[in-house]
Each structure stands twice: as C-alpha cells, then as structure tokens.
Amino acid sequence: MSYVDEVLARVKEKNASEPEFLQAVEEVLESLRPVIEAHEEQYKKEALLERLTEPDRQMKFRVPWVDDKGQVRVNTGYRVQFNNSIGPYKGGLRLHPSVNIGIIKFLGFEQVFKNSLTGLPIGGGKGGSDFDPKGKSDREVMAFCQSFITELYKYIGADVDVPAGDIGTGAREIGYMYGQYKRITGLYEGVLTGKGLTYGGSLARTEATGYGLLYITREMLKCHGMDMKDKICCVSGSGNVAIYATEKAQQMGAKVVTVSDSAGWVYDPEGIDVELLKEVKEVKRARLTEYAAARPGAQYHEGRGVWQIKCDIALPCATQNELHLDDAKLLVENGCKAVCEGANMPTTLDATKYLQDNGVLFICGKASNAGGVATSALEMSQNSERMSWTFEQVDQKLEQIMIDIYHNIDDAAKRYGMEGNYVAGANIAGFEKVANAMLAQGVC
Ligand code: NDP
C-alpha cells in the first residue's frame, strides 16, 4: 500500500464520524500523490502526512449565556489550532447551528494550505459554535460573544492565534468579541481581524474575499484568452462573500443574475441590484423575499436551484457541498466556462471531477477565496506597525496577491504534469511551503 493510501486509511478509521473532514483530507492527499511519491521514503520516515492531518490541538468548551427572557442557554464552542509551522494560527469563527468538530476540522485543515498560498506568514486554524445569531437581539448576540471569548481568550493572542469572521460572524460579532478580549486581558492588540475601522480594522477587508475571487477569476480567464465583460454569472449565497463577488463582477462588466440564501434563491435577469441586496442582507438582515418584492423583474424560488440558470461563470459563495454532481451536469450542458469557489468546499468531489473532465476551468476555494485571509494578514501588519493603509493600497496588494496565487497554482500543476488542474496546483503549492517548514523545524 502506498504511503498516501496508508495515511488515508488511518485518517478514515480515526475520524469516521467527520465526513467533511475526511472529504477535505481525501481531496488534498489524492492530488498530492505525485509530490508524496517523489519523496515517499523521507516523508514516511518523518510521518509528515500523519502530522499534517492531526491538528496541533483542539479546544471544545461550554458557552453559557442568558437570553432576553432571562433563560440560560448553552452552546458549544470550538477552536482547532491545526498547524503553525509558517506563522500564528489564523482562520475564522463560524457561528451556525450546523457547526460540529468535523466541520471545524475540515475548515482548519483547508486553511493551512490556503494561508500558505497567500505567501504571507500565517498558519491554519478555525473555530466557531453551534450558536445561531439569526433572530437574536443585539444584546443576546453580545451575551453569547462575551461568554465565548471568556473561554477562548486563553488560547488566542496577536502572535499565537488570530481568529476572524466566517459564516454568522460579521463586524458586529467581532466587535463584541474584541471588547471582551480587551476587558479580560487589558491588551489592545491585533488578536482578531475583521475589526471595525475605528479600532484597528483594515479598509477593504469587508470586500476582500469577494473582490479577491473576481481578481483571480479574471486572471485565469485572461490566461485562457477570455475576459469578464458581458459574461453571465450565477452566484450562490447572499452573505459577505456573495455580495462583494457580485459587486466586483458587475464592476468588471459581467452580469450576475442569481443569489441565494438558506431558504431560497433569486433569478434577476436584469442583473442583481447590489445596493438593494446590501440593504436587505447587511442592514435589515432579512430574507431574499424582500429583495424580490422590491424588484419587479426578479423571481423568487424556494429551496435550491441557482445552478439551473444558464451562465458563463458560476461562483458558489454560500457553504460547503452546495454544488452537486447534478448541478455540475447542468452547468456543463448550459455551456459554463468556469467555476471559481468563493465558499469553502462548496463543490462535492464528484461534481469537481465532472467539471474538470468536461473542460470547465475550476479553481478551488483554498486558492480563490484566499483574498479574505490575505487581507486579514494585511490587517495584522497594519496593527503591528500601528498604521492604517488606504483602501487603494490594500486593494492593490490584494489584487497582486490573487494574481500571484493564480500563477503559483498554475506553475505547480504544470511542474507535476497536470496543466490546468488548479485543484492539484493549489494543494501542491500550499503543501510545499508548509512541508518544508515542518521538516526544517524537526519533530514537533
Ligand atoms: P455569511 O454568513 O455572510 O453568508 C453565508 C451565506 O450562505 C448566506 O447567504 C447564507 O444564507 C448562506 N448559507 C449558509 N449556510 C447555508 C446552508 N447550510 N445552506 C444554504 N445556504 C447557506 O458568510 P460568508 O459570506 O462570510 O461565508 C460564505 C462562505 O465563504 C463560507 O463557506 C465561508 O467559510 C467562506 N469564506 C468566507 C470568508 C470571509 O471572508 N467571509 C473568507 C473565505 C471563505 P442564510 O443567511 O439564509 O443563512
């Protein structure tokens, strides 16, 4: 049995109840096969893959808080510190009822390679809770965030572990968490990113993941003789990533015709009105039915369905495993040219394979949504030098980072004879830097 198969079998046995984590490990290790085979003896002796697939540590803790009726509620908090061989742990906090240890581990594992791809000195981690901020008052969200940090503060710090936002964790939640961290520790340090602009946040961080997704998409299209102008795009999700992906795509001359949330989706043939979408989602925190009600030409549908709309470019920006094999078949049938992931692992493994086998250009989230964490790292730099950069400075750095990521993953795929396979390219390029650092630092 090859070393990769041996490790895969062991990871499956040890983590049988964590399907998302297994899916992520399988995707990465499968595409690393040629790299591992080239160094099989050394990596095996060093147990490199065993160390890479086992988090440095994982914390699970009780988060008690009091709701507006005076009732005590209890949620579970998590932080998985996966790998800090190239820098302090860095990765978001997800607040969503579906959160469990397997989901946090999959996200933390992916984050290790993504952070490496940015070219910046950040390790990988992830955290969150099964708390659902939806429908809660600001006071309830604050009570939860304060309780969450009262435990988490022990494990984080500006040079140790720097969490950020993710699904359900936006500027409001980060603000409450930062306030509590400061109150407990007395430290005014860059311990969280995604902060408000008046207390150490970075301009362009809000836009970064969505904008970055479009910068890398445009670069890939350019290298294949295409551009964004007049392209029809389908976007899923209507949160932070989806909103700013839609905005940048339209600034580049494309037309985005769909968005979705967990209840339904909108088809707006005239092109999504981004300002209206922001009003509905960022200000009112309402459902997409409100968007459709305010746009006479837009259709609202219950459930899932954005991938049935004919498009040139698909940008899944909601959550994991939201683009299935059937969706991939529809996209191919409708002449889709590129799928670039804004969310983390939104495309299932069989759908990814189908898209690649049918000539659709495909960039996986760990490369294409890395603009968010890259800009978080730029926020850390600004915090360290106690300076704030302009929007244009940050945006330009972000654009260059995304262009560099595209060329790195393209080169890595070519080096191993897999030209155009950007999944393999991303995994290989992300892995090489982390592996070298791990080997150089000895058995730890
Ligand atoms: P938000 O919470 O702002 O938005 C998430 C969107 O996805 C909402 O429209 C939400 O709908 C929808 N959604 C969430 N869960 C589900 C589900 N189970 N089924 C269907 N729809 C769902 O999160 P973000 O935009 O920040 O994150 C989106 C994705 O991008 C995630 O995979 C995240 O990990 C990834 N990502 C985010 C980064 C960032 O900077 N924000 C950076 C890199 C990756 P509803 O409101 O109805 O729940």
Image (cartoon, rainbow, N blue to C red):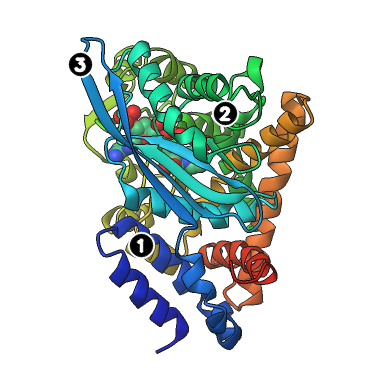
Mark 2 Cα within 10 Å, few/some/many (few <14, many 20+)? many
Counting residues from the start of the chain, the first of labels 2 and 1 encountered is 1
- Name the front one of labels 3 and 1: 3
Is residue 226 among what the camera can see?
no
Residue 76 relative to residue 145: left or right: left
Residue 420, percent from left and from top: 57, 67
Instruction: Please give the name of the residue rendered at 33% of the width and 45% of the height, measured from the top-left corner.
Output: 307
Ligand 1 lies under 8 Å from the Cβ of mark 2 = yes
* Residue 399: mark: none
Q: CA distance from mark 3 to mark 1?
A: 38 Å
Tell me which amino acid carries mark 1: Gln
Residue 326 relative to residue 429: left or right: left
Tell me which amino acid carries mark 3: Gln
Counting residues from the start of the chain, the first of labels 3 and 1 encountered is 1
Instruction: Please give the name of the residue rendered at 61% of the width and 22% of the height, measured from the top-left corner.
Output: 186
Residue 262 relative to residue 369: left or right: left
The residue carrying mark 1 is: 23
Which secondary structure, mark 1? Answer: helix
The residue carrying mark 3 is: 71
Mark 1 Cα within 10 Å, few/some/many (few <14, many 20+)? some
Which secondary structure, mark 2? Answer: loop
Query: Which residue is more in the foreground, 138 or 316?
Result: 138
Q: CA distance from mark 2 to mark 1?
A: 28 Å
Tell me which amino acid carries mark 2: Gly
- Mark 2 and 1 residues: CB-CB less than 8 Å, in contact? no
